[in-house]
């Protein structure tokens, strides 16, 4: 399916910016998203039940003009990055929340790096200014070190001091987001065509089937449209907005909950509308096949207990990362203790990057993909849809109910991980007495074995007058009289073929050897 579009410039219309809220845990992302949403509840909806559908739209008065903004309602850069990993570009602007009483923290830095990596402009919300000890200036100073220089200091980043709890300066923050979007981006889309966009969130509902929140990125999505989302397809049966209101159509940047898909898409899956049901089915099938191939390729690359030694031998890895999950903390600790007692030698390491109690979650799998780890489950199973995700990502998950069994498997894999060392072991030598030129087999060296044995398939070199003439040869054929032989001993005659190597003469010496693994002690 062609993603490239030749847009008719005249059909382009401005569209609302899509905003993601990021920042360190407990700095107030969730609270801020609530405050923004509530800043905008119209009278009819006040007191009504707002639905969490993964995104919502607000309207801002901007110089007498009503402007929309779309907020992704899953705070944090994890969701943002998970979507990017699927190739989806959803976010136009990032609001970086920093608590004024706490300051720049590791996840603040991570979030801003993720936004920068995606080329997304940042607006800083300095939150919790109502708190004692809040120091918005300190935050400005700290962020300057990460190239987020406040406008008031001559930089390009807008900082707004807010209190999500007291609903202070929320309007100013929205204004800053609008100004930043207008200054940095030309946000336009053509609403007059079949819709395309991205799934933001989805789940399976017992009564309603697949329920997916999608963000329309171009075109207009309508009830009755045939759509493909991820590997699923279907006819849009109904659509709802974040207030639970049924809607008939959704234009660019509008998030809507969609009913009617055959399967549940994943966050970051793209969707598109086609005129015909049959086409939708075909595209879905094609996508599934393409994904299967991509998954196979991924799985081949991803680390597993089976392919460690290979990866180590190829110098790709020297650490085995593990994620341990168990039913009770005592079991997880016992497992970890035993694992850390394994003698792994000097060349490789074993590292437990995460441990926890409970079912294996999507987060565990995501972590495993990022850090290339293996998941060990002890008396636990994966949560719903997690096995599917692990399969798709090629993450190796193993389940045990006996500690020894887990230790055994890992110990074996680690032993394989140790780079085997080989040494050259001389086998024997033979002197060429006569050369037979055979049109069928090439030149055959009629020889007598002078020491040790000559073995078929062994490596060989040719020595003439004490000097090596050719190395990296192999005993490709070995015969005694008319029979094939596997080896011929000292004192016996034989016919030796060195494959396509034909430069042999009477009096040459063929030396043979084998590479043998040095046994570990
Ligand atoms: P998140 O982890 O970033 O989503 O943070 P939350 O929104 O869950 O907020 C973490 C805690 O900080 C909660 O107890 C909030 O009530 C509190 N909090 C959030 N914003 C403010 C604020 O502006 N002022 C004060 N005093 N507390 C806040």
Image (cartoon, grey):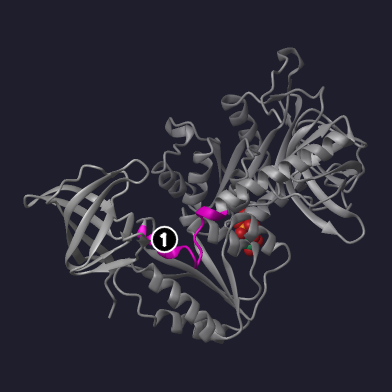
Instruction: Name which quarter of the figure residue 420 lies in.
Output: bottom left
Residue nearest the observer in this picture, 267 or 108: 267
Instruction: Name which quarter of the figure residue 315 lies in.
Output: bottom left
Q: Which residue is drawn at 19% across and 69% down?
A: 490
Locate residue 110, reporting x and y percent: 49, 51
Q: In this view, does 195 lie to the left or right of 111?
A: right
Residue nearest the observer in this picture, 313 or 368: 313
The stretch of residues the image draws in magenta is 299-313
Q: In this view, does 197 lie to the left or right of 333?
A: right
Locate residue 208, reporting x and y percent: 91, 55
Based on the picture, tell me whether residue 300 belongs to the magenta stretch: yes
Q: Can residue 47 be seen in this view?
A: yes
Residue under label 1, please give it: 310
Q: Is residue 94 above or below residue 520?
A: above
Q: Can residue 474 be seen in this view?
A: no
Q: Is the magenta stretch mostly helix, strand or loop?
A: helix
Q: Give the quadrant of ligand 1.
A: bottom right
- For the C terminus, which image quadrant? bottom left
Based on the picture, tell me whether residue 68 belongs to the magenta stretch: no
Q: Which residue is drawn at 84% across and 53% down?
A: 210
Q: In this view, does 435 lie to the left or right of 186?
A: left
Residue nearest the observer in this picture, 331 or 429: 429
Q: Is residue 48 above or below residue 487?
A: above
């Amino acid at each position: 399916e062609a993603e490239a579009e030749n847009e008719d410039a005249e059909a382009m219309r401005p569209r609302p910016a899509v905003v993601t809220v990021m920042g360190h845990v407990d700095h107030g992302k969730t609270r801020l998203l609530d405050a923004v949403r509530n800043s905008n509840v119209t009278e009819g909806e006040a007191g009504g039940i707002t639905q969490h559908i993964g995104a919502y739209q607000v309207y801002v008065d901007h110089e007498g003009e009503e402007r929309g903004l779309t907020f992704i309602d899953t705070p944090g850069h994890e969701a943002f990055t998970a979507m990017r990993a699927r190739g989806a570009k959803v976010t136009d602007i990032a609001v970086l929340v920093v608590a004024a009483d706490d300051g720049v923290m590791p996840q603040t830095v991570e979030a801003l790096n993720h936004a920068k990596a995606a080329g997304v402009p940042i607006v800083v919300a300095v939150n919790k200014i109502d708190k004692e000890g809040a120091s918005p200036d300190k935050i400005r100073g700290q962020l300057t070190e990460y190239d987020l220089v406040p406008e008031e200091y001559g930089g390009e980043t807008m900082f707004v001091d807010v209190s999500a709890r007291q609903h202070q300066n929320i309007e100013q923050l929205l204004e800053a987001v609008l100004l930043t979007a207008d200054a940095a981006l030309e946000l336009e889309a053509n609403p007059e065509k079949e819709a395309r966009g991205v799934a933001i969130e989805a789940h399976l509902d017992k009564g309603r089937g697949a329920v997916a929140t999608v963000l329309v990125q171009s075109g207009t999505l309508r009830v009755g449209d045939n759509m493909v989302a991820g590997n699923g397809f279907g006819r849009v049966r109904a659509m709802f907005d974040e207030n639970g209101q049924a809607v008939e159509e959704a234009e660019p940047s509008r998030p809507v909950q969609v009913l009617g898909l055959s399967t549940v898409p994943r966050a970051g899956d793209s969707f598109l509308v086609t005129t015909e049901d049959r086409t939708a089915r075909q595209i879905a099938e094609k996508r599934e096949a393409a994904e299967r191939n991509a998954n196979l390729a991924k799985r081949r690359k991803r680390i597993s207990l089976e392919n460690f030694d290979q990866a180590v031998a190829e110098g790709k890895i020297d650490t085995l990362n593990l994620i341990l999950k168990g039913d009770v903390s005592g079991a997880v600790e016992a497992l970890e203790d035993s694992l850390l007692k394994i003698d792994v030698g000097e060349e490789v390491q074993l590292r437990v990057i995460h441990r926890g109690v409970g079912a294996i979650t999507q987060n565990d799998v995501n972590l495993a993909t990022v850090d290339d780890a293996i998941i060990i489950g002890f008396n636990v199973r994966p949560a719903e849809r997690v096995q599917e995700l692990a399969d798709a990502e090629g993450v190796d998950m193993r389940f045990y109910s006996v500690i020894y069994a887990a230790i055994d498997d890992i110990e074996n894999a680690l032993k394989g991980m140790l780079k085997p060392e080989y040494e050259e072991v001389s086998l024997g030598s033979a002197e060429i007495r006569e050369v037979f030129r055979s049109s069928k087999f090439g030149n055959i060296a009629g020889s007598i074995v002078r020491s040790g044995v000559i073995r078929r398939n062994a490596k060989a070199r040719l020595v003439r007058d004490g000097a090596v003439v050719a190395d990296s040869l192999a005993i490709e054929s070995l015969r005694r009289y008319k029979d094939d032989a596997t080896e011929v001993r000292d004192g016996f005659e034989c016919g030796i073929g060195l494959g396509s190597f034909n430069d042999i003469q009477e009096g040459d010496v063929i030396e043979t050897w084998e590479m043998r693994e040095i046994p570990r002690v």
